[in-house]
Image: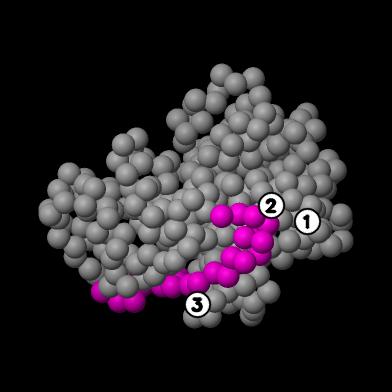
Amino acid sequence: MKILVTGGAGFIGSHLCDALIAREDEVWCLDNLWLGRENNIEHLRKDPNFHFIKLDLLDRVALNELFAASDFNAVFHLAANSDIRAGTSDTGLDQRLNFQTTIEVLEAMRTHQVKRLMFASTSAVFGENEAKLNEMDGPLRPISFYGASKLAAEAYISVYAHTLGLQATILRFPNVVGERATHGAIFDFIAKLKNTPEQLEVLGDGSQSKPYVYVKDLVEALLLTFQANLSQFEVFHVAGEGFTTVREMAVIVVANSANPEAALAFTGGDRGWPGDVPRFDYDTSRIRGLGWVPTFGSTEAVTHSVKRIKDNGF
């Protein structure tokens, strides 16, 4: 198949490109390199089925030229500002990079009759909710600009699917860990320890608890739902088994660092920053009903990722 991956040089996107090339699909990896990195996809450049395009999704003319020239069968839309904290200081960032980019992709797909969309969404659309969350839960009350922009994008995708014939599958990611990450707690902890090896600053009180999933397990979920016989519009939750606290993650990072005796210094409070959801719990029965079983549980995914990053770098 001819497949476009937006955000393809990023953390998750580059792993998806690896998997699609392994399937012998022809892949167009589109990225503006704001968070993506060319070295994430450097090993793919010699493959004749791989094409890298540096392009901003907000450049409507260039995007339509790409669609017109490439005859895509499907789009995996992963491009976004996935750094939730960054959206707090620039309140228009998520609107531009998460919501408006989705509108541009949807319009390009409509114009050029591309009917299959896979969309990367997030648990942040729910905001704070102590209940176990399934795909039919509501109301959705995001507390971050990131969550709000993804929820708005989901709404527009639903309209395009139900009125314009698009077949869309939305996967709501949890916290994703693994090599090639560009941000997130593990990334921040490793960077902090390089600067202050004797002490690791931990935002909040360390009790924040979330399910984590290893990036390659997530890619398997993406491919499984892509290949499944699904209806016009579907939503799936993806997460590893169990939960990991920020304190547990910090301990794992320190234990695998150059100074395993480094002290933990907590900043206090029940969350790391305004807009951070301190805990959530996903019901993943729908995706598991398709046969998806993650290789790692939540804390196993964190431990494996830290070791992979230690061996291979970010």
Question: x and y percent of residue 210 in the render?
Answer: 43, 67
308 left or right of 258?
right
Residue 225, disc: 2
Q: Is residue 11 above or below residue 71?
A: below
Between the C-alphas of marks 3 and 1, the distance is 30 Å
Judge the density around disc 3: few (<14), some (14-19), many (≥20) Cα neighbours within 10 Å.
Answer: some
The residue mark sitting in front, 3 or 2, is 2
Q: Quadrant of the C terminus?
A: top left
Q: Earlier in the sequence, mark 1 or mark 2?
A: 2
The residue mark sitting in front, 3 or 1, is 1
Tell whether label 2 touches label 1 (CB within 8 Å).
Answer: yes
Determine the residue positioned at 64% across, 40% down.
Answer: 5
Determine the residue positioned at 69% across, 52% down.
Answer: 225
What range of the chain is rendered magenta?
Answer: 268-293
Judge the density around disc 1: few (<14), some (14-19), many (≥20) Cα neighbours within 10 Å.
Answer: few
Q: Secondary structure at mark 1?
A: loop
Q: Tag 2: residue type?
A: Thr
Q: Say which residue label 1 marks.
A: 230
Q: Tag 1: residue type?
A: Leu
Q: Say which residue label 3 marks.
A: 128
Is residue 175 in view from this perspective?
Answer: no
